[in-house]
Image (spheres, rainbow, N blue to C red):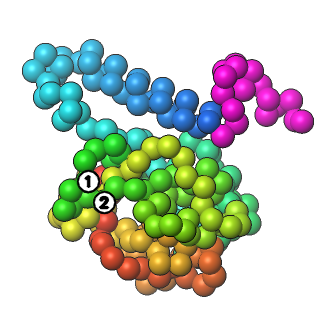
Amino acid sequence: MDPMRTTPAQLVPSAQPGRRVFAVRGLGVLAGLVAAGTSGVAAHAAPARRVRAEEEGWSFCDRCYGMVHLYFGQGVGRCAGAPAGHYLAGYSFAMPHDVPETANAQANWRACQRCYGLFFFGYPSGGWCPAGGSHYASGINYVLPHEVAETPKSQAYWRFCTKCYGLFYWGYPTKGACPAGGAHEAAGYNFVIPHH
Ligand SMILES: [Zn+2]
Ligand SMILES: [Zn+2]
Ligand SMILES: [Zn+2]
């Protein structure tokens, strides 16, 4: 056992290694709500159900073209395009989650605990993970807008890959590196992801 790895678990005695992620994310969401509640806007804020539930810290990986979570840090997380791990670039995305699915928003997207990528969890199979085998879903249910207009605060051309089930950026001539081999292959919706 590497003592450096056990320290965080000791700080949160009940946390298991795989669940520490949720604790961190939960705190982040809570902090966001607290901040909103203490702002001057709160006095005439919309009902709680209309509070935008978005998780910060998602980014494009310019090696595999996947959507990857930042909290895990640069250079970590198995990447199909680089042995050293994902390399994050560009916008900081804010991923909607735990809101109702609509005609223009698809639920059942999850973060993989092994590769830190976003993938579609709505099929019986878990796709193909760059860490080997299927992706392994974490708890947050992301709900991705699609077939809506791109704005200065959102980016279109994010697509589902039929080979790995990951979300990847389709807007370049090349289509990244798919963990299932070759480049990603798009199908279905044109997702439009909010960013800062
Ligand atoms: Zn990558
Ligand atoms: Zn994975
Ligand atoms: Zn793929």
Q: Quadrant of residue 104?
A: bottom left
Q: Which residue is mark 1?
A: 101
Q: How many marks?
A: 2
Task: Residue 42 in the image: state x and y as whole percent.
Answer: 18, 19
Q: Nearer the viewer, residue 61 or 46?
A: 46
Name the residue rendered at 54%, 35% in the picture: 22
Can the viewer see residue 170 in this picture? yes
Q: In this image, 155 relative to 169: left or right?
A: left
Label 1's element?
A: loop
Q: In this image, 143 relative to 72: left or right?
A: left
Q: Residues within 10 Å of mark 2 (few under 14, many from 20)?
A: some
Q: Which residue is mark 2?
A: 106
Q: Earlier in the sequence, mark 1 or mark 2?
A: 1
Name the residue rendered at 33%, 21% in the picture: 35
Q: In this image, 191 relative to 110: left or right?
A: left
Q: Quadrant of residue 176?
A: bottom right
Q: Which residues are magenta?
A: 1-18
Name the residue rendered at 31%, 38% in the picture: 53
Which amino acid does the dot numbered 2 rest on? Gln
Image quadrant occupied by the N terminus: top right
